[in-house]
């Protein structure tokens, strides 16, 4: 048992609209042991409060202090770099609200930063304006590099795919905030107030959760409750620290 856990959401805490019972039982167990935890998600479309409400509706009994979103990490990064910065965003309400709550200014031009999150109302003009702003010197940030998004109708373009359009147009690579880059896990470690040896990342996606933990230098726990199977791990040289079918096996 670790002193703290960073836990992915989709595929670990729930699958679509359905709770994953073994995770719910795991959270109840570690709470009784006073083990610290935060759920972490690359999804920038919802605020921490909205994610918290959803988890509570599924029975998790969590607070906003147990939630870390890529929007929150992005806002914190910009605020540390340049308080009250001017930001042009491609993204949904969760991203916009989180940035505004961090006293950052939303602008349509002359931005200090361009931030790209998943945007289901994306237009060519938004892509063009982001390109203009970056070419004029705005710092390019993307909430995550996920190329694909699982939907009820199948696989759709993810935020990473949107980001790639702007990267190709500008020739500038963005700073990514979500997994597998280290910014989100570093933020999580500071929030838990623990050191790397005391914390493990729990996830179902090798490319974001497991590689993210490896890149950051913390242990990882792979669970087979989401998008990938244990047999998939045979294809990769870097292995998770622990491999379980579900969190009932974690001691």
Image (cartoon, rainbow, N blue to C red):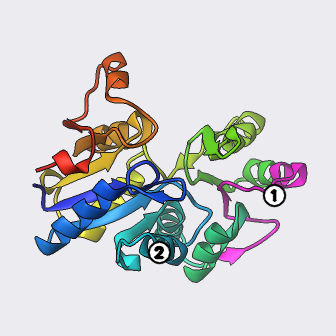
In magenta, the rendered stretch is: 105-129
Determine which quarter of the picture holds residue 26. bottom left
How many neighbours does mark 1 have within 10 angstroms: few (below 14), some (14-19), or many (20 or more)?
A: few
Q: Earlier in the sequence, mark 2 or mark 1?
A: 2
Residue occupying image coordinates x 60% and y 73%: 99
Residue occupying image coordinates x 71% and y 62%: 89
Q: Is residue 101 magenta?
A: no
- From the viewer's perspective, tell me whether residue 115 is left or right of residue 75: right
Q: Residues under labels 2 and 1: Cα distance?
A: 27 Å
162, above or below 103, in the image: above
Observer-nearest of 131 and 38 = 38
Quarter of the N terminus within the rendering: bottom left
Determine which quarter of the picture holds residue 5. bottom left
Residue occupying image coordinates x 33% and y 58%: 21
Q: Position of residue 163 (x, y in %)?
A: 67, 44
- Mark count: 2
Q: Position of residue 37 (x, y in %)?
A: 26, 65
- From the viewer's perspective, tell me whether residue 227 is left or right of residue 84: left
Q: Position of residue 22 (x, y in %)?
A: 28, 55
Q: Which residue lies under the disc numbered 1? A: 121
């Amino acid at each position: 048992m670790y002193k703290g856990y960073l836990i992915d959401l989709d595929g670990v805490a729930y699958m679509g609209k359905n709770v994953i019972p073994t995770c719910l039982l795991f959270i109840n167990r570690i709470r009784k042991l006073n083990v610290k935890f935060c759920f972490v998600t690359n999804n920038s479309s919802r605020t921490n409060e909205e994610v918290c409400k959803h988890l509570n509706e599924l029975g998790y009994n969590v607070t906003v202090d147990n939630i870390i979103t890529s929007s929150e990490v992005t806002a914190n990064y910009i605020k540390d770099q340049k308080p009250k910065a001017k930001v042009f965003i491609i993204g949904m309400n969760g991203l916009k609200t989180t940035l505004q709550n961090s006293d950052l200014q939303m602008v349509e031009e002359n931005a200090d930063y361009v931030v790209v999150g998943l945007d289901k109302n994306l237009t060519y003009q938004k892509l063009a304006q982001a390109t203009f702003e970056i070419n004029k010197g705005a710092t390019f940030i993307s909430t995550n590099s996920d190329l694909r998004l699982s939907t009820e109708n199948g696989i759709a373009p993810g935020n990473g795919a949107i980001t790639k359009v702007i990267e190709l147009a500008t020739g500038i690579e963005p700073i990514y905030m979500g997994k597998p880059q280290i910014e989100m896990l570093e933020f999580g470690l500071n929030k838990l107030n623990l050191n790397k040896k005391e914390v493990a990342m729990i996830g179902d996606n090798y490319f974001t959760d497991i590689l993210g933990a490896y890149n950051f230098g913390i242990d990882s726990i792979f669970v087979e409750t989401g998008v990938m199977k244990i047999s998939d791990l045979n294809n990769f040289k870097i292995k998770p620290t622990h491999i379980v079918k579900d969190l009932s096996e974690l001691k």
